[in-house]
């Protein structure tokens, strides 16, 4: 049951959502605001701004990512934060929390708090933008409902039809799984998925298979709605899966940065955040198993063809492997070259163990015999 009180206790699993948000905002804000006149962070289910234990809510986390950023003085573009909250008491509480930190915000930052709903606000704003034949400013839209209603795929499609927009969505798997056969929820699930195919999941008996069916369907619907790359990670409370966060973007670099934001919190690369064990998940790269990236590379490029490092880098940035570019050169390509599973055209680079732009590579064996599924 969603809480009825204005603020509520911070669940352990929520930390994973917040930490990845913070990590990503720290990367997104400078990149976007140094290259665009105006950028927009929309927290469409903003909440009261703090938890009953005093911890920051997502609006404050996103604002602090700017206020406390070492490069904030170099972020010249206008940064607009829009917070949408439907509940009157939470809206009032959020305004109070934001009033306290507003004096510390840089002059190029504006923030607005609306007492409204996600769908109504975004639909009206996007209608206005369409009428004026304009585009939405580059946007990061956080969609963090308590349940499965009021987040229609058609509105997410309209957001993603703008080229520099990204979505960060709480996909409430526990509720979907619980209510999938309840006729009362059919219209909500039709809207959530933007299709009726979710019904096929009802008959899947195996719980893992069913979960993958729903994840795959939601991911492919996000891609159909305009996301070129889709990632997700799961949030657990003790051993129970609570929900997954789906991230959709049209930017290859955005995809890479989000993977880095996830790895920072779950460095084993499984992208599970196990609630009360969240703090144990910071073990460092010492345990990184790049053998899995090796397999992904061999599967993608393992033929006798030569390939440019730029193509290999694009693959690693994308959602077709769980790894990011920080894992590629020193941690994976160099050891592969040492053991002879990677050949480099000598004239394409100056120094062994380095892979600058222009380097031409050949992966030596095919991974046809490896069975390696995508983590996404
Ligand atoms: C999961 S909480 C948000 C938590 C917040 N994003 C955070 O991480 O700190 C969902 C919030 O959305 C509000 N809400 C519910 N339906 C809404 C709607 N249709 N549009 C906007 N806000 C809504 C609820 O009152 C609640 O405060």
Image (cartoon, rainbow, N blue to C red):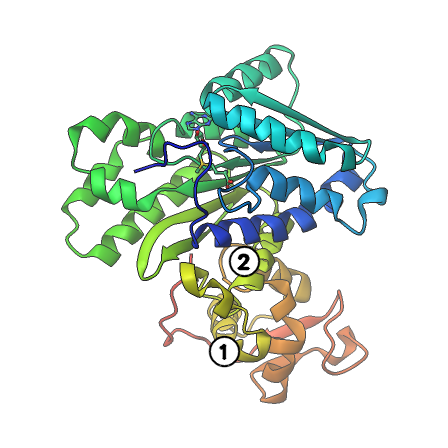
Residue 236, horizontal then vertical, whole percent? 37, 56
Q: Is residue 74 above or below residue 100?
A: below
Local packing at callout 2 (Cα closer than 10 Å; few below 14, some 14-19, many 20+) is many
Q: Quadrant of ligand 1?
A: top left
Residue 323 relative to residue 104: left or right: left
Which label's residue is closer to the chain start, 2 or 1?
2
Extreme bottom residue here?
Answer: 339
Spatial CA span between label 2 and label 1:
19 Å
Q: Is residue 202 above or below residue 365?
A: above
In the image, 79 versus 52, the foreground residue is 52
In the image, 230 versus 307, the foreground residue is 230
Q: Name the quadrant of the C terminus.
A: bottom left
Residue 243, horizontal then vertical, whole percent? 37, 48
- Residue at image coords 36%, 56%: 237
- Can residue 86 be seen? no
Locate residue 99: give its quadrant.
top right
- Which residue in the protein does label 1 denote? 291
- Residue at image coords 29%, 38%: 1
Residue 343, horizontal then vertical, whole percent? 63, 81
Q: Is residue 261 above or below residue 342?
A: above
Residue 83, horizontal then vertical, whole percent? 58, 28
Q: Is residue 323 above or below residue 361?
A: above
- Which residue in the protein does label 2 denote? 262
Asked which secondary structure carries label 1, the reply is: helix
Q: Is mark 2 within 8 Å of ligand 1?
A: no
Locate residue 217: give its quadrant.
top left
- Can residue 366 be seen? yes
Extreme top residue here?
Answer: 131
- Residue at image coords 39%, 73%: 368
Asked which secondary structure carries label 2, the reply is: helix
């Amino acid at each position: 049951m969603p809480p009825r009180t204005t603020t509520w206790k911070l669940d352990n699993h929520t930390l994973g959502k917040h930490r990845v948000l913070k990590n990503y905002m720290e990367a997104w804000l400078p990149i976007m605001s140094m290259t665009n006149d105006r950028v927009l962070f929309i927290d469409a289910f903003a909440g009261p701004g703090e938890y009953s234990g005093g911890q920051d809510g997502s609006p404050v986390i996103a604002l602090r990512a700017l206020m406390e950023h070492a490069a904030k003085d170099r972020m010249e573009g206008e940064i607009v934060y829009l917070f949408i909250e439907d509940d009157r008491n939470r809206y009032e509480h959020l305004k109070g929390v934001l009033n306290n930190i507003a004096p510390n915000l840089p002059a190029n930052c504006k923030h607005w708090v609306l007492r409204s709903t996600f769908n109504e606000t975004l639909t009206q704003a996007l209608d206005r933008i369409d009428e004026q034949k304009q585009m939405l400013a580059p946007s990061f839209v956080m969609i963090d409902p308590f349940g499965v209603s009021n987040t229609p795929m058609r509105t997410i499609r309209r957001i993603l039809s703008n080229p520099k927009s990204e979505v960060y969505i709480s996909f409430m798997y526990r509720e979907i799984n619980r209510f999938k056969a309840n006729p009362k929820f059919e219209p909500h699930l039709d809207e959530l998925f933007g299709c009726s195919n979710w019904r096929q999941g009802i008959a899947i008996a195996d719980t893992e298979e069913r979960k993958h069916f729903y994840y795959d369907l939601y991911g492919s619907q996000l891609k159909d709605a305009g996301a070129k790359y889709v990632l997700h990670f799961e949030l657990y409370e003790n051993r129970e899966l609570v929900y997954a966060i789906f991230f959709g973007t049209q930017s290859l670099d955005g995809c890479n940065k989000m993977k880095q934001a996830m790895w920072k919190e779950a460095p084993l690369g499984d992208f599970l955040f196990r609630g009360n064990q969240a703090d144990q998940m910071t073990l460092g790269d010492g345990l990184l198993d790049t053998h899995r990236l090796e397999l992904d590379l061999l599967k993608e490029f393992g033929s006798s063809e030569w390939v440019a490092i730029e193509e290999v880098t694009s693959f690693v940035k994308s959602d077709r492997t769980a790894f990011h570019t920080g894992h590629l050169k020193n941690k994976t390509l160099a050891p592969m070259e040492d053991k002879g599973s990677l050949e480099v055209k000598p004239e394409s680079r100056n120094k062994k163990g380095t892979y600058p732009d222009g380097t031409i590579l050949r992966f030596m064996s095919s991974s046809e015999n490896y069975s390696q599924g995508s983590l996404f």
